[in-house]
Image (cartoon, grey):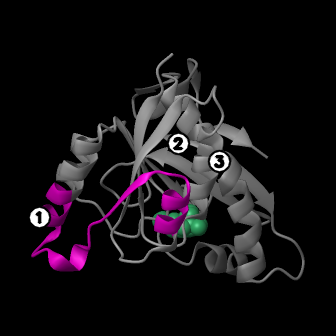
Amino acid sequence: MPRKPVAVLISVRGSNLQALIDAARRADYPAEIVRVIANVPGAGGLARATQAGIATETIDHRKFANRPAFEAALDASIRASGAELVCLAGFMRLLTAGFVDAWRDRLINIHPSLLPKFPGLDTHKRALEAGETHAGCSVHFVRTEMDSGPLLVQAAVPVLPGDDEDRLAARVLQAEHRAYPLALSLVAAGRVRVAGEQALIDGQPGPVRLD
Ligand code: GAR
């Protein structure tokens, strides 16, 4: 089966990008990363992509007059790459309806909480403050409302005594590195369909849970 071409959008260090790169090295992985785009010059993930022989581009949002202009440049770069799916991997810009709707059910995000709990920032701090017994991550199709959309994969980890934000974040990040490659493989292999804003994976209501 031909591999689905994917563009990955990043802003920062790119450890989730690395997990996707590593997964896609396997001959039987159904997706191939064809371009990595950063909105922040020098984002750590760019070096990871170059190291793996993947084309990179920096599209600095500060150089555009407004969000639609920035997103038009993003869209043009993604389309020029031939990508058919887009993965947000630590991409820290909100995307407007124009972009999100154009890539509906082909645009995937990872978020460091068990959505619908704790959308937005400071997820681990808020999970600790709320006294949660479990934290985790969610991979989902993107909708215009921040950190919402049909859930593909969730991975939970325990909150342990003595956890602080950094320790919990590190534990969740390990789970992210398992969840994202799985979610992308499911979408790329054509095993996901969206019905009534729920992801159906091989016909079963999502998300797939990795615990
Ligand atoms: C990850 O924890 C990801 O879930 C989070 O940013 C980090 C990026 O790390 N994304 C968000 O908070 C998006 N709302 P990485 O650059 O090492 O993959």
Mark 2 and mark 1: Cα distance apart in space: 29 Å
| The image quadrant in which ligand 1 is located | bottom right
Could you say which quadrant of the image residue 122 lies in?
bottom right
Instruction: Name the residue type under label 3.
Output: Asp
Q: Percent from the top left, x then y, of residue 169?
A: 70, 72
Instruction: Name the residue type under label 2.
Output: Leu
Is residue 44 among what the camera can see?
Answer: yes
* Residue linked to disc 2: 151
Instruction: Name the residue type under label 1.
Output: Ala
Verify CB contact (< 8 Å) between mark 1 and mark 3. Answer: no
Image-based side of 36 in relation to 57, left or right: right
Residue in front for this viewpoint, 75 or 28 = 28
Characterize the local packing of mark 1: few (<14), some (14-19) or many (20 or more) Cα atoms within 10 angstroms.
few
Mark 3 and mark 2: Cα distance apart in space: 23 Å
The segment highlighted magenta reads: 45-73
User: On residue 22, which mark appears?
Assistant: 3
Q: Is residue 16 magenta?
A: no
The local secondary structure at tag 1 comes to helix
Residue under the point 24% across and 73% down:
61
Is residue 118 among what the camera can see?
Answer: no
Residue under the point 81% across and 68% down:
159
In the displayed structure, would residue 160 be above or below residue 138?
A: below
In the displayed structure, would residue 27 be above or below residue 165?
A: above
